[in-house]
Image (cartoon, helix red, strand yellow):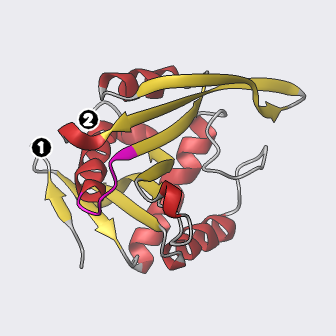
């Protein structure tokens, strides 16, 4: 079943997705590539220093749809994919972690920023995941993604730690921060 939220701005539509049309997949890959190019510190979980080819991105997004523990959300502006959020729930054999989920990817294409999409997607995903008895969402973010950090803190995510050697790019270590949010108030 596809869950949908129409935001205050009626040009925005957020969907929890189970399938992607060819058009949506193409637009999602384009948005991801634009985000990676615009912000060299964003990687969509890829361990590449260069922007992945479109076929690699397509395989990633289509493969993610096959994993039962992953939930994906897209946001469209005027019918064009502008943002993506991906949650990872623990597998069924991780009973001690069954209360939590993790945001593993969250981005908005450069052309669509400043419209509240990232926050709207975050809130929509939190509301839906809370229905499945998840009461904590975790995430990690690179130190140089200052706008993302501001957003997560504004939305009630609490920093619980940092790692000086979170990632390594061009022989330089990147600091990463770890956050969580209790969903009791969602």
Q: Nearer the viewer, residue 11 or 177?
A: 177
Q: Quadrant of the N terminus?
A: bottom left
Hey, which quadrant is residue 170 in on the image? top right
Position in image of residue 17 (x %, y %): 34, 70
Residue 147: image x %, image y %?
45, 23
Please give the name of the residue rendered at 41% of the width and 65% of the height, measured from the top-left corner.
71
User: Of label 1 and label 2, which has the lower sequence position?
Assistant: 1
**How far apart are the alpha carbons under marks 1 and 2?**
9 Å
Residue range (magenta): 131-136
Q: Main secondary structure of the magenta part?
A: loop
The stretch drawn in magenta includes residue 143: no
Q: Is residue 186 above or below residue 59?
A: above
Circles 1 and 2: CB atoms closer than 8 Å: yes
Q: What is the number of the mark on residue 9?
A: 1
Residue 79 at least partly seen: no
Q: Residues within 10 Å of mark 2 (few under 14, many from 20)?
A: some
Instruction: Report whether residue 70 is seen.
Output: yes
In the rendered image, residue 135 lying in the magenta stretch gets the answer yes
Residue at the spot x=26%, y=35% of the render? 116
- In the rendered image, the quadrant that contains the C terminus is top left
Q: Crowding at label 1, few (<14), some or many (≥20) Cα neighbours within 10 Å?
A: few
Q: Nearer the viewer, residue 78 or 68?
A: 68
Q: Is residue 166 above or below residue 82?
A: above
- The answer to whether residue 91 is left or right of residue 49 is left
Helix, strand or loop status at disc 2: loop
Left or right placement of residue 99 versus residue 127 in this view = right
Residue at which label 2 appears: 116
> What kind of element bears circle 1?
loop
Q: Nearer the viewer, residue 15 or 176?
A: 176
Instruction: Identify the residue at horizontal 44%, vertical 79% (top origin).
Output: 22
Q: Position of residue 138 (x, y in %)?
A: 47, 41
> Where does residue 78 sit, x and y in percent of width and height?
22, 56
């Amino acid at each position: 079943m596809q869950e949908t939220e129409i935001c205050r701005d009626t040009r925005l539509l957020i969907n929890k997705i189970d399938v992607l049309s060819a058009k949506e997949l193409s637009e999602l890959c384009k948005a991801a590539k634009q985000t990676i190019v615009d912000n060299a510190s964003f990687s969509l979980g890829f361990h590449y220093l260069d922007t992945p080819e479109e076929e690699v991105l397509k395989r990633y997004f289509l493969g993610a749809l096959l994993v039962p523990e992953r939930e994906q959300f897209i946001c469209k502006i005027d019918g064009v994919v502008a943002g993506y959020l991906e949650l990872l729930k623990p597998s069924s054999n991780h009973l001690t972690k069954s209360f939590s989920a993790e945001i593993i990817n969250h981005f908005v294409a450069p052309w669509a920023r400043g419209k509240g999409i990232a926050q709207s997607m975050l809130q929509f995903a939190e509301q839906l995941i809370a229905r499945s008895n998840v009461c904590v969402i975790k995430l990690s973010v690179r130190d140089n993604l200052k706008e993302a950090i501001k957003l997560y803190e504004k939305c009630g995510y609490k920093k619980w730690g940092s790692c000086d050697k979170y990632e390594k790019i061009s022989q330089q270590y990147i600091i990463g921060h770890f956050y969580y949010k209790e969903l009791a108030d969602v």
